[in-house]
Image (spheres, helix red, strand yellow):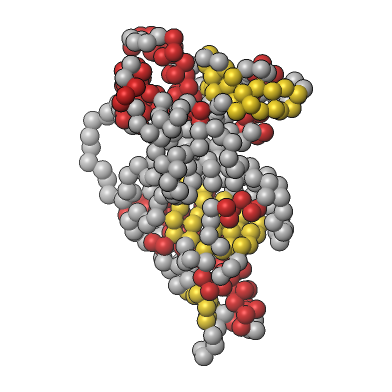
Amino acid sequence: MHFTFTVNGTERQVTAGDGRSLLDVLREDLGITGPKLGCGEGACGACTVLIGRRAVTSCITPAAEAAGQRVTTVEGLAEDGVLHPVQQAWLEQGAMQCGYCTPGWLTATAALLNRVTRPDDARIAAELSGNVCRCCTYPRILRAVRRAAELMEQPELLEPVPPTASGSPGPVGGTGALPWDQARDAASFFEQLPDGLVTVVAEDAEAGAEAVPGRWGGPDDAWVHVGADGSVTAFTGKVEAGQGTRTALGALVAEELAVPPGSVRVVMGNTDVSPFDLGTFGSRSMPYAAPPLRAAAAAARELLREAAAQRFGLPAADLTVAGGIVAGPDGAPSAAYPELLAGVRRVERVPVDGPVTPPADWRSAGRPRGRPAGATWSPASSASRPTCAPTACCTAACCAPRRSAPRCAAPTPRPPRPCPA
């Protein structure tokens, strides 16, 4: 079925079969990733969008029902470069933790305040009962809804949409480049990354497969970029919420690439540039995110070793890698990663089960350390930041081999407390 509808102020033409949901068309066909897939049954609210002024759960709404309608997602709430009251209220109150459910809350609240200017707490609870926050930020959400109601009547207090790293307001229409995990062209990486090497562990990758157009991004995927400017950036779909995973993952990538641990940036849960991920829960971040990141980093190291071997005319096995430098035997030439990557824009798919450094040979991973440098990702529209700095002890326990993982001291007993507000 072919039909036209307006999404965030832009007329779009799509083709959708009878069984396709509005959420599927928005995310997969139009690249609008604000609405999130949660339960798939219309019970959690993460996929909420507006059709006209009415909030609907797009995961169970047939796409055909939007034909000729005006659809607004979270990307389209801001108008004329100014935040919508619900957006500003959420920012003021810090009414999110992982942020996955936030787009649905914002659109649902916008629909509520379009109908009721000053809802009381009972009305708010009843109207928004279809939205779930697994991080338990309900007290902050309640305060944010109250604040949004105030801002609806005080538009002069609304602030501009925060600028991106380029200095221009962030995207509000969802019509820009596709997120990397949906991009069909490997060149999309280098629209934002400097020259260098990108190694991709993707669910459809095969050992030695050439990077060709296709959809990347599954729950166990990762990519690592080694830049000609000396930067190293690792991308994962997991989220840092104070567990220390950012530090631990950065240490593992640094170990495989043989670079200083503090030189690795880890970008987490940024839906513009990170791999798709089902969610951060169930103590799965390290066992799920670490293997593909280690594989991607180790493969990048070996590709750089091969590049140096070709340059020097030496066997790759004769070269050593340390401190971001590939060196030959005594008296032989050496080259730093930036030298090997000058003018290079290379993307390679690599297998998740490729060889990695055995824990017994680790030189830096598994040792206590603080939060890694460069934790945010600026070229994308929304940076991912850690909630708090992990303790060195917990970080070491995440990274170290099980047989030598240090034990944290027993915590001081304290009374139970409710979910943080």
Residue 258: x and y, percent?
A: 48, 68
Going 44% across and 59% down the picture, which residue do you hit?
A: 264
Q: Nearer the viewer, residue 255 or 15?
A: 15
Going 61% across and 62% down the picture, which residue do you hit?
A: 345
Left or right: residue 132 compared with residue 297: left
Task: Name the quadrant containing residue 1.
Answer: top right
Left or right: residue 145 compared with residue 327: left
Q: Is residue 128 above or below residue 395?
A: above
Q: Nearer the viewer, residue 416 or 70?
A: 70
Q: Quadrant of the C terminus?
A: top left
Can I make out residue 179 in this image? yes
Residue 328: x and y, percent?
A: 55, 83
Residue 116: x and y, percent?
A: 40, 9
Residue 211: x and y, percent?
A: 69, 56
Left or right: residue 171 compared with residue 315: left
Q: Nearer the viewer, residue 378 or 158?
A: 158
